[in-house]
Image (tube, rainbow, N blue to C red):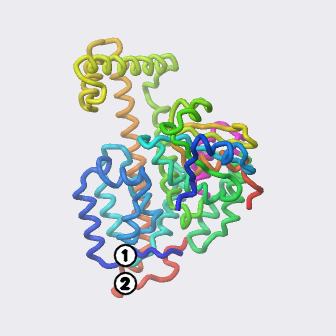
Amino acid sequence: MSIYQAFGYAAKRAALIADIREKGPIYQAWLTRASVEGDISILSDDYGLHPALARLLPALGAFGEAEDATGFYEALLNAIPVGAETGALARQTLLLAWKDPVYGRANVIKPGPLHAVCKGVVDLVTQSIDKPIDKKAWRATRTALAAMRNADASTERAVDLVMSLAWDLEQAPGAAHDVITAWSAAVNIEADASDEDCFSDAENETFQAEMNKINEEAMEALSETQSLDSIGVEAFLAEVERVWAADPVRNALKQRSMARRARSNAKMAVWRAAIQQQVLDLAAAAFRSRNASPSGAQPAQSLSR
Amino acid sequence: MSKLKDVTTEAFEAEVLRSTIPVLVDFHAVWCGPCKASAPALEDAAREFDGEIAFVKVDVDQEPTLAQQYDVQGVPTFIIIKDGQPVERFQGMVSRGKLATVLEPFAGAGE
């Protein structure tokens, strides 16, 4: 299915694991920054991981969150045999975004014509695990999905996610990143919406207005003692913090907002851990026979569904 | 090689307004993170819709007149121009899914 074969030799896998470990928590690390700007090619060019799997790593890790994902990376990389083709694992992982019984988008789109069109996309992704799919087939599913997008406004985000699934990962591996990012955003919105202390619309508006006002006040205060160009991020954030703290009424809103964020982040961590475990299970199942084989030979269809 | 062509104010009329196919104009800036993050998706979409929709970039700092003319308040801003007229606009970082959703109605018949 692809020209990529993992690692090449065992020492390269160890080198990649060591490199990721050395670079620290993923949200500060090169992997996230590189993926955001689109250049994560080293993982494919030097380490032989399928570009779609490479792009899944930061998104599945702890994209933008203070969760240390190195344990997940190590377990996943260790589960991939040297020389393995990893595009199928990437596709199986993406299918979780639709099929997962708790978080999958199949739960969001009610049975009916739109669900059927989405299912058509999912079927193509499933088929693409075993064989190349014609460009026209991908295109036809996208055209059908675009035509139905406005059928139900409440499903718009889920449809956008499915639309990101409808790409040939050999031609557009970045679509893998789009799918997980869309899934993560949707789960985050659901986590916020189910919070025990949701802001009312009025509170939300007030909080946004106060935040903008305080940012402006902080900038103005700092600019009295230094030029705008020389104001650093740390100094700005410290001043913002000071202004919030100086006003108990405004600060109460901020504290509530921070508490909500912490609760949502905890829910996101639960989601991420569940998906990471499923990816590890998929990898274990897909590569079991090869990892168990002394010769390292992989059955031709070991990654098929 | 990039499928997204940089367009200047001088070339805008010939490249965009008189184009025989719809054109997605990406108003961007070199300092803009979301613009950079959107670039790979735009390249993929440009390849997918090759011959059906043209993709061009306008650097708002280099071409402020165009940015002003199309009321670009932030970057990235994307405007689809068909028969010389803006017919759709959206802002912010884009995914392949979002691009496909917006562009499909302006593309050919699925070829």
Residue B29 drawn at (x, y percent): 47, 41
Question: Residue sitting at 63 percent across and 40 percent down?
Answer: B79
Residue A159 covered by magenta stretch: yes
Q: Nearer the viewer, residue B30 or A2?
A: B30
Tell me, yes or no, whether the two marked residues, 2 and 1, touch with CB atoms within 8 Å.
yes
Q: Position of residue B56 (x, y in %)?
A: 59, 48
Dividing the picture into quadrants, the one containing residue A141 is bottom right
The residue at which mark 2 appears reads as A296
Residue A22, percent from left and from top? 22, 58
- In the image, A245: left or right of B71? left
Please report the residue visible at 24 percent of the width from the left and 64 percent of the height from the top: A18
Q: Which mark, by number, is residue A81?
A: 1
**Residue B75 in the image, given as x and y percentages of width and height:** 50, 37
Is A173 in front, or is A41?
Answer: A41
Residue B111 is a magenta residue: no
Instruction: Work out whether mark 2 precedes mark 1 in sequence or the reverse, and give the earlier one.
Output: 1
Q: Quadrant of the C terminus of chain A?
A: bottom right
In magenta, the rendered stretch is A149-166
